[in-house]
Amino acid sequence: MDYLARNIITIALPALILLIGIVATGKTGDAAIAAGLKKVGCSFGTLSGLSVLVIAGFVANYFSYFVVDGLLIRFYQKRRVLEQPEKLTIEIDKLPITNDLKIKLKWAVLHSNSKIIGLKYIFLRWFILAAIVDAVLSIAGYLGEFNRLFELNSHFKLQYMLIGISIFIFFALVRSKKIWLLVSAFCIIINLAEIVPWYFPAPAFAGAAPGQHLRILHSNVLTSNQRYADVLSLVKKEQPDIAVFVEVSTAWAKELSVLSEMFPYSSQQQESEAFGSAIYSKLPLENASVQAFSSRRKSLLADVQFQGKTISLLLVHPSVPIKQHSFIDRNQQLAAIGEYAAQVKNPLIVVGDFNTTMWSPFYKNMVNTGKLRNARSGFGLLPTWPTFMPLAYIPIDHFLVSKEIGVLNIHTGRNVGSDHLPLITDLVL
């Protein structure tokens, strides 16, 4: 009985994860499983999705021992208070369970002070493990310059902090050893220190007069997304002076071309059928060009005339750092963007999907070199990706501005079918 229950739990968790992935794709039939695995694997593909399910299976199997064994042990411990241990051991021998579990149950009945008892001990072990993992991951993010996986850990400060808070509350309630309270408090503090500054100080130029600001909308539309009308509707609703787009496929380029009615000036570049970028503007664009910061993912550059001044606008979309070669390429692009920004004489706006958060050491080097600041400073984290997994939300879309440019406001737009939320900002010179 216990063997069957453990197997059901072991299979149920990976099956549930795969089912959620399949439902999210909207596909049916044989193709649904492959599509579901790819969805589970996020940007890392089908093989990664399969690996996630295998890991989930191992975790579920490990947890099943605590659930099945723990509940039965607790059940017999309570009965031991009113019934004779000898009677209970005879009953245990007749149960349709494995010999291993029978031994555990007899031990719990005959030795009331054993540590194999109670769900409290089981959960305590799990939370101790969670505290250790949370602390290790929190620290590993600061070693991002040395390893791709370490750098990946740097992006989830908010999640690590929330986990740390949950662990701290648990240890406080069960009155565990103070060492684990200190470990969870460490996780809270180290991550909170990286989050709080994004909410302070108060935004500059908050009292600027209406009509004197420059509104820019950015959207990674996602190559496979077909909700064209939703994107166009968002643009009409937000009424930006400039709208910029990345992951523009040839199909998207065709659909976005209707924006020429609202935006008389535009610039596009199409690297392939699947990837490109576009700028649509109500303001005159000058010196539009394509800038290559590495051998992959070219950037769009243009000068914008605003209130008698020239603002340089750079639209970027560095590589996704999934594999080592793309990780190196993305870091080269970030470094080159920083060096380029340092040489620009005009007020500068660098916008796009940077495929990194503000906590990456490579991002920090870029903004320090280019003397740029993130427009979300003072407005909060504003996570933008991934829309299909809200618990893992991280801010990887950015507006970076030079010191001459003030920020009136910045906010995320509604979900338009992409894996990224749009980002809209109001700027002022």
Image (spheres, rainbow, N blue to C red):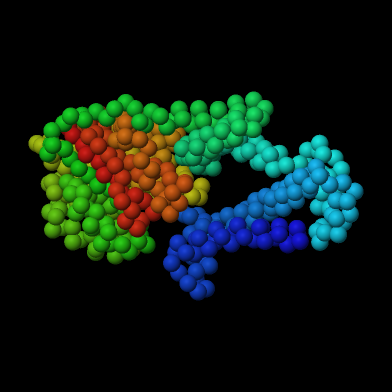
Q: Is residue 83 left or right of residue 251?
A: right
Q: Is residue 67 left or right of residue 106?
A: left
Q: Nearer the viewer, residue 369 or 203?
A: 203
Across and down, in percent, residue 89 comes to 87, 51
Q: Nearer the viewer, residue 327 or 7?
A: 7
- Whether residue 60 is visible here, answered yes or no, is yes
Name the residue: 81% across, 52% down.
Answer: 101
Across and down, in percent, residue 423 comes to 30, 45
Name the residue: 49% across, 64% down.
Answer: 22
Q: Quadrant of the C terminus?
A: top left
Across and down, in percent, residue 159 comes to 49, 40
Name the residue: 22% across, 34% down.
Answer: 408
Q: For the view shown, which residue lies furthest in the bottom direction? A: 29
Relative to residue 157, is residue 284 depicted above or below? below
Q: Nearer the viewer, residue 8 or 351?
A: 8
Across and down, in percent, residue 229 comes to 25, 62
